[in-house]
Image (tube, rainbow, N blue to C red):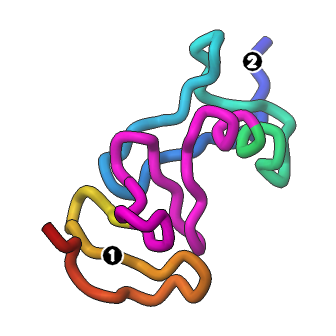
């Protein structure tokens, strides 16, 4: 028998990478609100920033660890207000 079930996946908003847990699982079935998969992703250094999600390869913190730099566009965002504050400084 086949049955449709609902599941949750987390996709990096920068590169499109799917979060995979230690066992290689991509989808958490029955996790209606996404809390279980997000707890695991958070423990694997994924970042939830506003309504976006980033894998560990797609973000970093600036030299003061106060702001987030998104790899794709190189722009810097204030951690607390989520406002863009300009391009990354070299």
Q: In this view, does 47 lie to the left or right of 31?
A: left
Q: Is residue 78 magenta?
A: no
Q: What element carries label 2?
A: loop
The image shows residue 29, relative to residue 1, as above or below, that is below
| Residue 7 drawn above or below residue 27 | below
* Residue closest to the far left: 90
- Find numbered disc 1 in the image and state the secondary structure of the residue it sits on: strand
Question: In the rendered view, would you say 12 is above or below 13?
Answer: above
Residue indicated by mark 2: 2
Where on the picture, by quarter, is residue 84?
bottom left
User: How dense is the environment of label 2, judged by Cα within 10 Å: few (below 14), some, or many (20 and up)?
Assistant: few
Left or right position of 38 against 85? right
Q: Quadrant of residue 43?
A: top right
Quadrant into which the C terminus falls: bottom left
| Magenta part of the chain | 40-68
Which tag is nearer the camera, tag 1 or tag 2? Answer: 1
Q: Does the magenta segment cover residue 53?
A: yes
Give the position of the N terminus as an image quadrant: top right
Nearer to me, 50 or 65: 65
Q: Tell me if residue 20 comes above or below residue 12 in the rendering.
A: above
Q: Which residue lies furthest to the front in this view?
A: 64
User: Residue 2 appears at what percent x and percent y?
Assistant: 75, 18
State the image quarter where residue 24 is shown.
top right
- Give the image location of residue 69, x and y in percent: 34, 65
* Mark 1 vs 2, N-terminal side: 2
Identify the mark at residue 76; answer none if there is no mark. Answer: 1
């Amino acid at each position: 028998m086949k049955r449709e079930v609902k599941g949750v996946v987390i996709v990096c908003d920068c590169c499109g990478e799917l979060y995979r847990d230690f066992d290689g699982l991509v989808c958490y079935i029955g996790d209606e609100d996404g809390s279980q998969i997000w707890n695991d992703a958070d423990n694997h250094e994924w970042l939830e920033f506003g309504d976006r999600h980033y894998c560990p390869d797609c973000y970093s913190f600036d030299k003061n660890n106060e702001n987030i730099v998104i790899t794709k566009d190189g722009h810097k965002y204030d951690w607390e207000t989520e406002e863009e504050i300009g391009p990354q400084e070299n």
